[in-house]
Image (cartoon, rainbow, N blue to C red):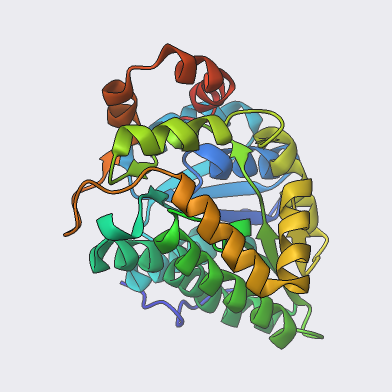
Amino acid sequence: MVDAYDAQAPTGSSATGRADTAPVAVVLGGSRGLGLLISRELLRRGHRVVVGARDVDELASARELLADHGTVVVEVCDVRDRHEVGALVGMVERDIGPIEVMVTVAGIIQVAPLESLTLQHFEDAVDTMAWGPIHAAMTVLPAMRRRGRGRIGTITSIGGMVSPPHLLPYATAKFAAVGFSDGLAAGLSGTGVTATTVVPGLMRTGGHVHAQFGGEADQEYAWFAPAASLPLLSMDAERAARRIVQGILSGRPMVVLTPLAWAGIRVRGLAPGTTTRLMGVAGRLLPGSPDRGGAALVEGRAARRQLGSRIVDRLTRLGDRAASRTNE
């Protein structure tokens, strides 16, 4: 198995002897949600796309959904494991072609009050959303730098700029991802390789279905799922994917999506202490925790059944439709 950070990459044509006819893009976490839409957008722009994700069944579904849009290859890959990332990169460079674009989207969302969290929740978040982008970028960089070209995109979040209440493991990992990607962009200046930090706000990807909820899980779902579904609070995911891909391919150092994300960044920059106090007030308005020792989180589908609210179901209708379109 090829070790990450040392994946060797031939330049020129692939191992099959067939001349490269289109640039190769790898999307880690591309089997569902925003990752699937980014994969589709890259296909539409003429790339051959390799989708990496952990779940075999989701990868099979993604291949079916993407096949009509261009050449797509799916491979099992866990971004938390640098050896798996290295093996994937080595295979792509050897058998498909030089990687021109690497996008890391893989993520998990854990929604719970601080009292319901354990160290394991933080480890899961950081392994996926902080180490994942590091594994991807540091593995693909040597070959990109030898060729003098390449595009690296890391999907972070407004949660990596302003830490929102009841999303602390998520924010911790996303803050790390922002710091890494932003520093990477500076470090690559003048090399021909670029790194783009993508900072979305809430998007209608249907992610509330797979999000994990703790504490009073049904009540946490009751505020999070509508927020991730309503048009005034969340962005259309297809439009977001187009803007993200355009920003990455053009080599922009940062792409910020949604007016709320822009506003959050500016308010945080101007008044960091006040922003933290406001987040504290917002947190006190959210559900509390019935336990103090930490408990297993439940998936969005289960929290929804526990809640059993027709009103919340109506408020999440657009998010549910997005979930059906994005393999969530």
Vertical relation: 129 (above or below) 75:
below
Image quarter where the C terminus lies is: top left
* Picture residue at 30% right of the left edge, 71% below the top: 1
Q: Is residue 166 visible?
A: yes
Q: Is residue 215 left or right of residue 270?
A: left
Residue 25 found in image quarter: bottom right
Is residue 157 visible in the rendered image? The answer is: no
Residue 195 rendering spot, x and y as whole percentages: 70, 71
Residues 129 and 115: in front is 115
In this rendering, position of residue 127 left or right of residue 25? left
Left or right: residue 144 versus residue 319 is right
Q: In this rendering, is residue 199 above or below 141?
A: above
In this view, the residue in front, 103 or 171, is: 171
- Say which residue appears at 61% left-offset and 26% top-offset: 68
Q: Which residue is found at the position 33% from the left and 47% from the top?
A: 288
Q: Nearer the viewer, residue 239 or 117?
A: 117
Q: How far across and down, in percent of the image, does residue 157 sit? A: 60, 57
Q: Is residue 118 left or right of residue 67?
A: left
Q: Position of residue 153 (x, y in %)?
A: 65, 62
Report the number of discs. 0
Q: Nearer the viewer, residue 91 or 272?
A: 272
Where does residue 194 sit, x and y in percent of width and height?
A: 74, 73
